[in-house]
Amino acid sequence: MTREEAQTAWEKIVNIGFSDYQKLTREQRVWFNIEPLTTDGLWDHYMNSGADKNADTIEDLEYLNFSSIANQLRKFNKKYFPKGVPEGPDARQEKFDKLPEGELEQDIEEMDDFFWNVSEDLESALLEHINVTGIGKG
């Protein structure tokens, strides 16, 4: 099954994820948290609502055997959010706005360069997860 063929199931998962995240099954949660990474990258994860579930996203990357990407997020979190990733894009942006010019940009570039080099592998693993678990048929 392709992602296009699974679009209806994806839309249902998105609706559950945004309305009652706790109702997602483990398999659905992996899709919900990883899909946006495959299309938008790690920086957008922090700029959008994805980082509200940052700890789960790291777990889900590990679940798909992508420790290298999970470690990128951990490294970024340790440097910029040592007390935990703030809830909401505005709260994260507020933290970023207080940083010295240039430092964040360099880290973002390094993080995204690394990510985009392995993103096709992540995308393939996610599609395999969707097919093996059958969650794309919903």
Image (cartoon, rainbow, N blue to C red):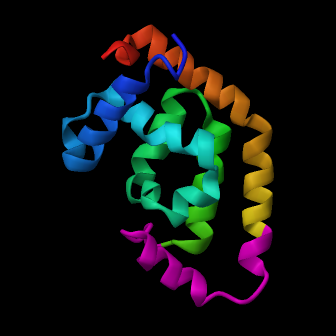
In this rendering, is residue 115 above or below 131? below
Residue found at x 80% / y 70%:
106
Q: Nearer the viewer, residue 4 or 34?
A: 4
- Side of 64 relative to 138 (left or right): right
Vertical side of 43 occupied by 19: above or below:
above
Q: Residue at x 59, y 54 (%)?
A: 73
Q: Residue at x 62, y 62 (%)?
A: 76
Above or below, 110 relative to 30: below
Q: Is residue 106 left or right of residue 8?
A: right
Q: Reply yes or no: does residue 101 show up in magenta.
A: yes
Q: How many marks?
A: 0
Q: Report which quarter residue 78 is drawn in.
A: bottom right
State the image coordinates of residue 62 (x, y, percent, origin top left).
53, 34
> In which quadrant is the C terminus drawn?
top left
Residue 25 percent location from the top left of the image:
27, 28
Residue stretch in magenta: 83-106
Asked whether residue 18 is drawn in magenta, I would say: no
Q: Nearer the viewer, residue 77 or 116?
A: 116
Q: What residue do we see at 75% from left, 88% from top? A: 101
Q: Quadrant of residue 127?
A: top right
Q: Is residue 91 above or below residue 16?
A: below
